[in-house]
Image (tube, helix red, strand yellow):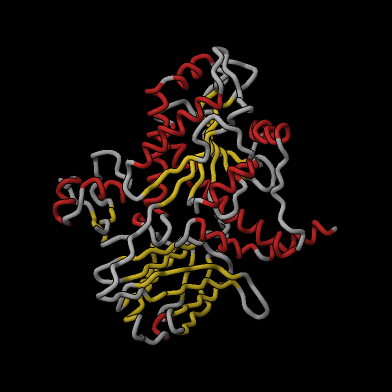
């Protein structure tokens, strides 16, 4: 009975999944509405001013997905709310102030609402969702924080996004073993090191290894290390095994709090989690207090949405390197993925039990291809959803590609480095499409 009550309470607070936005700051992710759900409506907008920031509250009739980004020269903040409408002229009721010069709104992609804030100075935007409480319904809160600039203080350097790379197994836990005697713990560490090198060659991203050598780490310790690094993403690398040696292909998994998405995912999670049952217990439980459990579950819910997004980007790149065993990102209860507010995925790079794939896993050239594919997927995700305060999140302006333009000509026009332009937009190929919009990076 208590569990049913707790789950009902969780459902009533589903809007709080925006608390997980710190995992991918600047993007508060709500549960996706059903395709046939009615359009969300903005009932009212309220503005209040504080010493260091301006707060805008959008009263909604139901929960909605939204995204947030900044543009510069001139300074603007753009808020997109998916499948949402607003009465014409509603933004006109908000008076301009010393920070906000004007507010514009319009329809985007048929059903989405776009609100543009023209600003007098550079700001740091933050957004989050609030669930119904008392007489208040669903609310989307946008805070515009002043950035302090002085002639004597240098502008703070934008940080890199941090990717924690976890090579599965290690030490007394060898993982699966191939028919030729290949240990899973060895190939995962080799691929992890190549992935670290590949990611660190991209501006704006920094990879850090959870396991740097052949040592055993408990799953809880892996999570703690990722949190200590303030990781924006965690990637756990493995090599699958199956009794039938014909099984082959790569798969990507994200956490599920409601059960595995397939029997294979459930069995695999049981196998990977068994290492700590053999070599040391783990305890991922939070305090029994109901509120803490609710916040923990909601944090995971928002993080899972981001994990599925990341997994999809990487899966689309892995297809060019290896056969895909599962065409979609699977979900299961992997203990190593239970890091609150850190989007996490587990990649089964191949079946070590398949002789051909075991040979590939031992190949340096194949390992580099796998690392390159993962790097491209990570880059494409962060080009869309980089955390605020990172170099990848900053945009000087946007550019619409015209016929005949290439990366070199655009870089020359805006006086930016070609590699920086590629990194900001995850451009891993030369071809550009007419009409494509790319972001011009800050110096």
Tell me residue 326's x, y (percent).
54, 32
Measured along the vertical axis of the image, is residue 248 above or below residue 159?
A: above
Residue at coordinates 30% horizontally, 79% vertically from top-left? 120
Quadrant into which the C terminus falls: bottom left
Q: Quadrant of the N terminus?
A: bottom right
Residue 427 falls in image quadrant: top left
Q: Is residue 408 left or right of 389 when viewed as pictured?
A: left
Q: Residue 305's spot in the image, x, y percent?
A: 55, 51
Viewer-closest of 65 and 407: 407
Give the left or right position of residue 417, taking residue 70 as reference. left
In the figure, is residue 258 to the left or right of 230? right
The residue shown at (49%, 29%) is 324
- The answer to whether one can see residue 315 in this image is yes
Asked whether 434 or 325 is in front, the reply is 325
**Residue at 42% of width from left, 69% of height from top?**
125
> x and y percent of residue 417 in the render?
20, 50
Residue furthest out toward the top: 180
Say which quarter of the image contains residue 271.
Answer: top right
Q: Is residue 246 visible?
A: no
Position of residue 151 measured from the top left corner of the image (x, y, whole percent): 25, 75
Of residue 70 and residue 291, the one placed in the foreground of this image is 291
Question: In the figure, is residue 408 to the left or right of 180?
Answer: left
Q: How many marks?
A: 0
**Location of residue 183 by image quarter:** top right
Residue at horizontal 52 percent and vertical 25 percent from the top: 186
Q: Looking at the image, is 271 positioned above or below residue 23? A: above
């Amino acid at each position: 009975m208590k569990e049913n009550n707790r789950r009902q309470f969780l459902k009533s607070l589903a809007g709080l999944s925006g608390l997980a936005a710190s995992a991918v700051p600047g993007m508060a992710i709500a549960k996706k509405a059903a395709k046939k759900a009615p359009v969300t409506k903005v009932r009212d907008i309220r503005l209040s001013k504080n010493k260091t920031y301006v707060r805008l509250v959008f009263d909604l009739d139901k929960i909605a997905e939204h995204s947030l980004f900044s543009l510069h020269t001139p300074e603007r903040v753009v808020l997109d709310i998916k499948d949402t409408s607003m009465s014409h002229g509603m933004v006109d009721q908000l008076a301009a102030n010393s920070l906000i010069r004007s507010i514009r709104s319009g329809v985007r992609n048929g059903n989405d609402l776009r609100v543009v804030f023209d600003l007098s100075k550079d700001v740091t935007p933050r957004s989050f969702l609030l669930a119904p409480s008392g007489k208040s319904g669903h609310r989307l809160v946008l805070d515009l924080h002043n950035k302090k600039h002085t002639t004597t203080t240098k502008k703070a350097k934008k940080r890199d996004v941090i990717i924690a790379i976890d090579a599965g197994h290690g030490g007394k836990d060898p993982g699966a073993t191939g028919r030729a005697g290949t240990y899973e713990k060895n190939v995962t560490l080799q691929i992890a090191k190549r992935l670290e090198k590949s990611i660190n060659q991209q501006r704006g991203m920094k990879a850090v290894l959870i396991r740097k050598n052949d040592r055993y780490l408990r799953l809880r310790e892996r999570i703690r290390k990722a949190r200590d690094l303030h990781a924006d993403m965690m990637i756990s690398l493995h090599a699958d095994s199956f009794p039938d040696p014909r099984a082959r292909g790569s798969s990507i998994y994200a956490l599920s709090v409601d059960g595995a998405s397939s029997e294979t995912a459930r069995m695999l999670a049981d196998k990977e989690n068994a290492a700590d049952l053999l070599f040391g217990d783990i305890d991922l439980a939070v305090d029994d207090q109901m509120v803490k459990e609710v916040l923990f579950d909601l944090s995971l819910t928002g993080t899972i949405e981001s994990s599925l997004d990341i997994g999809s980007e990487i899966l689309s790149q892995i297809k060019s390197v290896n056969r895909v065993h599962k065409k979609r990102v699977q979900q299961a209860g992997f203990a190593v993925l239970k890091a609150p507010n850190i989007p996490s995925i587990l990649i089964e790079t191949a079946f070590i039990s398949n002789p051909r794939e075991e040979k590939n896993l031992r190949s340096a050239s194949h390992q580099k291809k796998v690392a390159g594919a993962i790097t491209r997927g990570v880059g494409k995700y962060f080009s869309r959803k980089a955390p605020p305060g990172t170099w990848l999140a900053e945009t000087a302006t946007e550019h619409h590609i015209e016929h005949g333009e290439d990366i070199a000509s655009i870089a020359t026009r805006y006086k930016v480095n070609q590699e920086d332009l590629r990194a900001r937009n995850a451009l891993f190929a030369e071809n550009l499409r007419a009409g494509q919009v790319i972001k011009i990076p800050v110096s």
